[in-house]
Image (spheres, grey):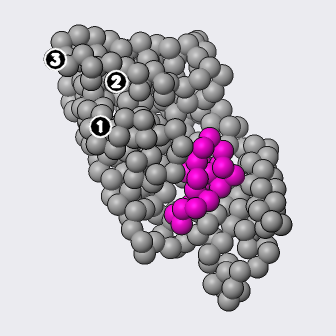
Amino acid sequence: MLTIDEHVQVVHQIIQEIPPLAGGLSFPGFRKLLETVLADRAPSAGNLPWLMLPILTCEALEGDVSQAHHVAAAFEIGRIAAGCLDEWQDQDTDNALWRAIGAARAVNLALGLLPLSFLALSRLSDLKLEPSLVLALHEEFHRTLFDMSAGQDADLRDDRSLHDYEQIAGAKSGSLFRLGCRAGALVAGAPVDVAGRYGDFGYNLGVVAQMWNDLQGLAGLRGKGDAGQQRALPTLAQQAAEEMAAGPSPEAGQVGSLYTLVRIQVFHRRATEALARCPEPGRLSLFLDAYGMRHLVEKAQQTTSQQGEENAR
């Protein structure tokens, strides 16, 4: 059984061997840019990256993990493309790609990554996977991309509220994680209903990841400035609390963080229950551990501490 880091190395080697990157691209400068972005955004050693969702799902079902590696490659490229677009649309990350190369080139690169993702998926045909299954996986990826685009459009609207948040988070991060688990189950030969169970786990885990990201952004981690964005869950919760109190209060900022922590635990429990309904959890429980209470409390403490310092100024 390969380690997490070994799986990541295999996946990124597969990415480098996709024909447009391996050779034949008319513009070497664009290929170099693609290679640089993909390498810079590769998971660092010791972490549990999202690309492991299809791999660990396939592994749990005792499927051919070499096939799951190609699914993970397509998933990883799509994740990076979505991240590049999201940074430009939200403008909340200090070291975002669009700041370095300009918005037009960053958007163009993200659009180039999307077909590269589908090319990675198509290489499953070389592994003798049934054509009907390859087509089904393509449909899963296309539907997810559409759901994420619809969710992002709703996220960018000025009239969104706390009531809208969880549906939008589900369309964006929830659908992405669901894709990772469903695709891993399908490539392992699981029936559609079994793939759906793993997909339910991924969906709830994805919402947890989105809420976790909002807490990190509020704490100012990794250069993200979500504290100034009205779309983050803690900020929306804070605004709702202020509306109920008819004005700001010293505790309002903490209310936003604590509300987020509670909702994270709700979806974490749903993810735990969904995984329990799957035939075999395998190592997917590692994701539950990564987003467990201990880590959440640590992040919440960082957030509330920073907010307390800001309120005292």
Write down the residue under mark 2.
33
Q: Residue at x 62, y 75 (%)?
A: 239
Q: Secondary structure at mark 1?
A: helix
Residue 4 location (% of width, % of height): 59, 20
Q: Residue at x 52, y 45 (%)?
A: 93
Q: Residue at x 41, y 21 (%)?
A: 36
User: Sequence-wise, which precedes: disc 3 or disc 2?
Assistant: 3
Q: Is residue 224 magenta?
A: yes
Residue 148 location (% of width, % of height): 37, 51
Q: Secondary structure at mark 3?
A: loop
In the figure, residue 247 lies in which quadrant? bottom right
Q: Residue at x 33, y 18 (%)?
A: 32
Dot 1 and dot 2 residues touching (CB under 8 Å) = yes
In the figure, residue 68 lies in which quadrant? top left
Question: 10 Å neighbourhood of mark 1: few (<14), some, or many (≥20)?
Answer: some
Would you place residue 93 above or below residue 311 in this image?
Answer: above
The type of residue carrying mark 1 is Arg
Q: Nearer the viewer, mark 3 or mark 1?
A: 1
- Which residue is most to the bottom? 246
The type of residue carrying mark 3 is Ser
Write down the residue under mark 3.
26
User: Sequence-wise, which precedes: disc 3 or disc 1?
Assistant: 3
Tag of residue 125 = none
Would you place residue 289 above or below residue 59 in this image?
Answer: below
**Quadrant of image for the N terminus:** top right
The type of residue carrying mark 2 is Leu
Which region is colored magenta? Answer: 208-232
Query: Spatial distance from mark 3 to mark 2, Cα to Cα?
Result: 13 Å
Write down the residue under mark 1.
105
Q: Is residue 246 magenta?
A: no
Type of secondary structure dominating the magenta stretch:
helix
